[in-house]
């Protein structure tokens, strides 16, 4: 019995070490945070160094706008956090509120993503940086016995078209995406 245990343990160790050297399947590269465009549902931390009254946490409204003290309401549609930093800086200088402002914007909470179809717990989930399709499915408690694991369908936020995506270790999910796991036929 002990010999069987030792042989089994060695076989398992060899199998796991062989798998750890295998390259991950190629897939699309996730968007870099600098390319992330702001939209409704994002929570931002705005810091204007040296000016507490011009700093704080804000939520991007449903119409893709933010409202800031002394600056007012402004659209963030299509802007990155760096773009928004530049616009706020320019407005503070233009309105002669701050001579040389240093504005920093961090996304503190991304808008959610959604998982539908043949998963054990479909629903809305909080997004985290670097999220992949496989992780999104795991967040929804995995695929049901009827679910198709080889590929899923993703509808990117703002699009009306679902795109089939192969489930790989690097297939990205972005904030606002809807991941749908299809049903297999056999």
Image (tube, helix red, strand yellow):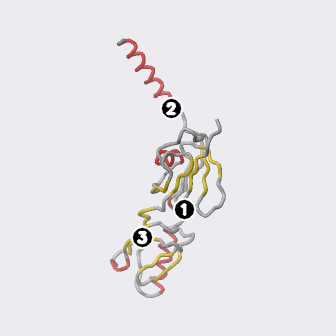
The picture places residue 94, in percent across and down from the top left corner, at: 48, 86
Relative to 21, residue 153 above or below: below
Is disc 2 surrounded by few (<14), some (14 to 19) or many (20+) residues within 10 Å? Answer: few
Q: Quadrant of residue 25?
A: top right
Q: CA distance from mark 1 to mark 3?
A: 16 Å
Check the picture and name the quadrant holding the C terminus.
top right
Element type where label 1 sits in the image: helix
Q: Quadrant of residue 47?
A: bottom left
The picture places residue 32, in percent across and down from the top left corner, at: 52, 57
The picture places residue 171, in percent across and down from the top left corner, at: 57, 47
Mark 2, residue position: 21
Is disc 1 surrounded by few (<14), some (14 to 19) or many (20+) residues within 10 Å? Answer: few
Mark 3, residue position: 104
Element type where label 2 sits in the image: loop
| Left or right of residue 107, residue 76 in this image | right
Mark 1, residue position: 35
């Amino acid at each position: 019995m002990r010999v069987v245990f030792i042989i089994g343990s060695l076989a398992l160790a060899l199998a796991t070490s062989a798998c750890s050297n295998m390259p991950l399947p190629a897939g699309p590269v996730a968007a870099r945070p600098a390319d992330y465009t702001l939209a409704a549902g994002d929570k931002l931390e705005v810091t204007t160094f040296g000016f507490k009254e011009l700093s704080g946490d804000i939520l991007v409204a449903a119409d893709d706008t933010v409202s800031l003290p002394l600056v007012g309401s402004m659209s963030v549609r299509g802007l990155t956090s760096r773009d928004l930093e530049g616009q706020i800086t320019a407005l503070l200088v233009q309105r002669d509120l701050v001579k040389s402002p240093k504005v920093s914007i961090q996304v503190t909470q991304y808008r959610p993503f959604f998982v539908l179809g043949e998963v054990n717990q479909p629903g809305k989930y909080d997004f985290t940086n670097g999220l992949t399709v496989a992780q999104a499915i795991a967040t929804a408690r995995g695929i049901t016995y009827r679910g198709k694991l080889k590929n899923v369908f993703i509808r990117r936020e703002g699009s009306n078209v679902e795109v089939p995506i192969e489930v790989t270790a690097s297939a990205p999910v972005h904030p606002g995406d809807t991941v749908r796991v299809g049903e297999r036929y056999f």
